[in-house]
Amino acid sequence: MPITTEEASKIKEHLLTQLDNFPEDKRAQISEQINSMTEEQVENFIKQNNLTHLGGQCIFCSIIAGKTPSYKIAEDNNYMAILELNPLSKGHSLIIPREHLEKIPESSKTLTDEVTKKLQNKFSPSEIKINELKIMNHALMEIIPIYGDETEKHQASEEELKALQEEILKVEQIEAPKKPEEIVTEKIPIIPPRIP
């Protein structure tokens, strides 16, 4: 079924919100291309890039439902923590409420703190920035470890994201304390008392 002019307009708006993920020198050109697309071109773009979730459904709701792949690093009953696909730094993560909410609830703090602590222990960044975002009207928490060499976001490869996910989820092996070696005692011979 072809998309309507209104749907195409919403999809274009969403695509334009993603311009920050592209190099600055390409943004104007990409913006111009998006704005000049017809409804048919928008529909073809969605199909070619496997972006069927843009047909009105929120990408984050699609991730929560398991319809869109993600790299989960933590979760609880109300939230899911995933790796950002276009990270600014190593460990850049998003906390997604399982419900489509326009404001992030205070209860997200528990998982946000857990992920922040995990990233701090694993990678020792100089600081960790936490921002509240809204993408496709879905409120999120963004956790960005700062190391001091961040310049701009880049698109992470699938291999890079899988390796990072494994590194974050890897449980540190705690060595069991070694048993003290048994002390071997020698019998000391008893010498008869000497008379001077």
Image (cartoon, helix red, strand yellow):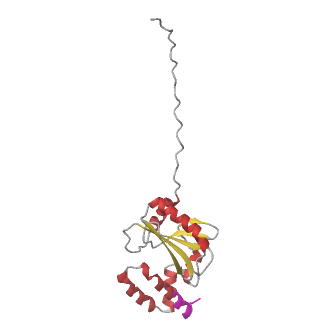
Which x, y percent locates residue 166?
50, 60
Count of numbered circles in the view: 0
Which residue occupies the extreme top position in the image?
195
Please indicate, yes or no, whether residue 66 appears anywhere in the rendered image: no
Q: Answer whether residue 18 is magenta in the image.
A: no
- Residue at (55%, 66%) from the top-left corner? 113
Please, is residue 60 above or below residue 44 in the view?
Answer: above
Q: Residue furthest left?
A: 25
Dominant secondary structure of the residues highlighted in magenta in the image: helix
Q: Residue furthest right?
A: 77
Which region is colored magenta? 1-11
Q: Residue at x 50, y 88 (%)?
A: 13
Q: Position of residue 33 (x, y in %)?
A: 42, 88
Residue 158 lies, in percent from the top left, at 47, 67
Q: Is residue 35 visible in the rendered structure shown here?
A: yes
Residue 9 vertical position relative to residue 115 in the rendered view, above or below: below
What residue do we see at 58% from left, 67% from top?
111
- Foreground residue among 158 and 118: 118
The picture quadrant where one finds residue 52 is bottom right
Residue at the front extreme?
196
User: In the image, is residue 49 above or below residue 128?
Assistant: below
Judge left or right: residue 159 versus residue 179.
left
Q: Quadrant of the N terminus?
A: bottom right
- Which residue: 57% across, 65% down? 74
Quadrant including the C terminus: top left
Q: Relative to 35, is 134 above or below?
A: above
Residue 194, position in %: x, y?
47, 7
Between residues 186 and 41, which one lies in front from this camera angle? 186
